[in-house]
Image: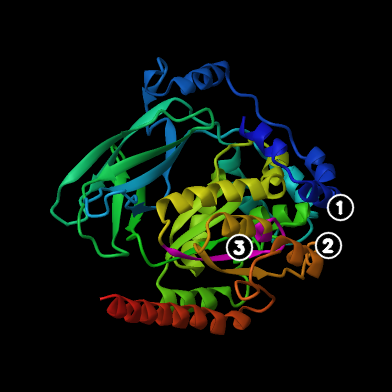
């Protein structure tokens, strides 16, 4: 269903960009999807029954691999603001079947597509890296699995809450809200929960974020990490064959944003969820950790993997930002993206939808990869941000251009607070 939806949500501009960059030609060269076993298909049919699923079974860590995604705890806005509200956490987990499929064909195809000819001395190392990175994309998913999450008290009183989760859906994923009691908790406090039976090896970090403050929503690919999203071969090379590289100057800029605004950090990418561990490790190496939101479908083939980056990205990001607004409607938002996908259009759409929520939009103009002339045109940006004040959105090439703008956001916040205080005095 997710794949059908993705195709239906493809914008004409995305389709044209895919044709210009030859995505379909590359996708047709890549190996086809693994067939699921009949038992997996049968379990998938019953996942829509949720807790009544007759085939649901507890996850078995001898047979299954489970990932828990880091997240934020938030307090929903209540019509009676003086009523204490519990903290809520959206738990995202995914389950795979242990064991390795024969992925030699996939390794060979990726190596051939990116021009790895077997003559260089480092090819063996690169092929090992390709195999390691490919494996999570080609795991068999584990639908209809349930699990128990053990969540510690944020008050350090040694109490632990058990939360039943699942079952996982046909892509081996579950997304479920759990609640913790109302507490007066410092913004930014983090706790670590773990999967029952994992001896603490399957964990997630939850960061508590109070309703007000700043929120940074950041794209990843070609905004803060080199991916070459407009080029199919470039995506394969940077994802599977190379060590991930941050965009020059962006780690330093994000450290400045953390120091100046102290935001809650949410990273929103069109990458499939199979890359969670890879991207999480990258973020922890170069950037402030936070919630990482990825596409919740498992393609099991590399052609579909490439479609994640190039098809229906505007609709996907707008939908996820809608959800983020539901978590933090009172926070002031800074959005960071780039020109390779539909970040300008998606951010502009949400700016118009939620008046006053998004305070600034920074778009990196990507100039060092092919197929970018139309995407980098002034006309594209003017059309995307039509009707939005010029001081809200900025297209930049060098991160150094943004330091003063970040400082201005802080100064404007302080000025707004002072003005509100003066107004309150007059109202008395």
Q: Is residue 2 above or below residue 159?
A: above
Q: Using a 10 Å C-alpha cutoff, classify the residue at mark 2 as few (fewer than 14 neighbours), some (14 to 19) or many (20 or more).
A: few
In-image side of 412 versus 340 (left or right): left
In three-dimensional space, the C-alpha distance between marks 1 and 2, rounded to whole angstroms, equals: 10 Å
Q: Is residue 377 visible?
A: no
Q: CA distance from mark 3 to mark 1?
A: 26 Å
Q: Toward the viewer: 308 or 275?
A: 308
Neighbourhood count class around disc 3 (C-alpha, 10 Å): few under 14, some 14–19, many 20 upward: some
Residue at 79% in and 70% down: 378
Residue 82 % position (x, y): 22, 54
Q: Count residues near mark 1 (Cα–Cα under 10 Å), then give few for <14, some for 14-19, many for 20+.
A: some
**Pointer 2 residue:** 374
- Looking at the rendered structure, the secondary structure element under dot 1 is helix
Residue to which mark 1 is pinned: 20
Q: How is the image coloured?
A: rainbow
Q: Secondary structure at mark 2?
A: loop
Position above or below: 9 against 337: above
**Tag of residue 244:** 3
**Dot 1 and dot 2 residues touching (CB under 8 Å):** yes
> Does the image show residue 290?
yes
Along the line of sight, the residue nearer the viewer: 351 or 27: 351
Q: Nearer the viewer, mark 1 or mark 2?
A: 2
Image quadrant for the C terminus? bottom left
Start and end of the magenta stretch?
A: 331-344
Location of residue 392 by image quarter: bottom right
Q: Depth check: 40 or 315 in front?
A: 315
Query: Which residue is drawn at the image coordinates 40% and 72% (left, top)?
Result: 262
- How far apart marks 2 and 3 lie (CA) works out to 27 Å
Residue 293 location, x and y as percent? 51, 50
């Amino acid at each position: 269903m997710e794949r059908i939806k993705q195709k239906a949500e493809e914008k004409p501009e995305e389709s044209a960009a895919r044709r210009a960059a030859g995505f379909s030609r590359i996708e047709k060269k890549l190996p086809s999807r693994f067939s699921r076993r009949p038992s997996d298909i049968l379990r998938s049919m019953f996942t829509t029954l949720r807790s009544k699923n007759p085939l649901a079974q507890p996850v078995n860590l001898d047979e299954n691999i489970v990932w828990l995604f880091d997240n934020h705890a938030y307090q929903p806005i209540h019509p009676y603001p003086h009523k204490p509200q519990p903290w809520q956490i959206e738990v995202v987990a995914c389950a795979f079947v242990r064991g390795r499929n024969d992925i030699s064909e996939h390794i060979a195809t990726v190596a051939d597509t990116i021009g790895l000819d077997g003559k260089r001395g480092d090819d063996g190392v690169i092929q090992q890296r390709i195999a390691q990175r490919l494996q999570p994309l080609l795991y068999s998913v584990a639908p209809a699995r349930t699990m128990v999450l053990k969540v510690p008290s944020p008050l350090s009183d040694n109490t632990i809450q058990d939360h039943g989760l699942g079952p996982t859906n046909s892509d081996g994923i579950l997304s479920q809200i759990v609640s913790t009691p109302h507490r007066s908790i410092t913004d930014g406090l983090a706790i670590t929960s773990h999967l029952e039976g994992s001896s603490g090896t399957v964990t997630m970090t939850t960061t508590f974020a109070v309703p007000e403050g700043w929120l940074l929503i950041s794209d990843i690919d070609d905004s803060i990490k080199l991916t070459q999203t407009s080029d199919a071969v470039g995506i394969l090379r940077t994802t599977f064959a190379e060590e991930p590289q941050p965009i020059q100057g962006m780690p330093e800029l994000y450290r400045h944003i953390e120091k100046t605004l102290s935001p809650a950090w949410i990273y929103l990418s069109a990458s499939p969820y199979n890359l969670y561990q890879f991207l999480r490790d990258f973020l922890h190496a170069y950037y402030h950790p936070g919630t990482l939101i990825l596409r919740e479908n498992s393609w099991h083939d590399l052609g579909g993997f490439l479609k994640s980056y190039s098809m229906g990205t505007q609709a996907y990001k707008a939908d996820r930002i809608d959800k983020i607004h539901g978590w933090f409607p009172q926070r002031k938002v800074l959005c960071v993206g780039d020109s390779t996908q539909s970040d300008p259009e998606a951010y502009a759409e949400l700016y118009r939808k939620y008046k006053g929520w998004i305070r600034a939009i920074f778009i990196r103009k990507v100039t060092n990869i092919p197929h970018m002339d139309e995407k980098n045109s002034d006309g594209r940006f003017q059309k995307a941000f039509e009707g939005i004040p010029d001081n809200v959105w900025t297209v930049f090439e060098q991160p150094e251009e943004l330091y003063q703008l970040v400082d201005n956001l802080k100064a404007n916040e302080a000025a707004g607070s002072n003005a509100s205080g003066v107004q309150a005095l007059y109202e008395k």
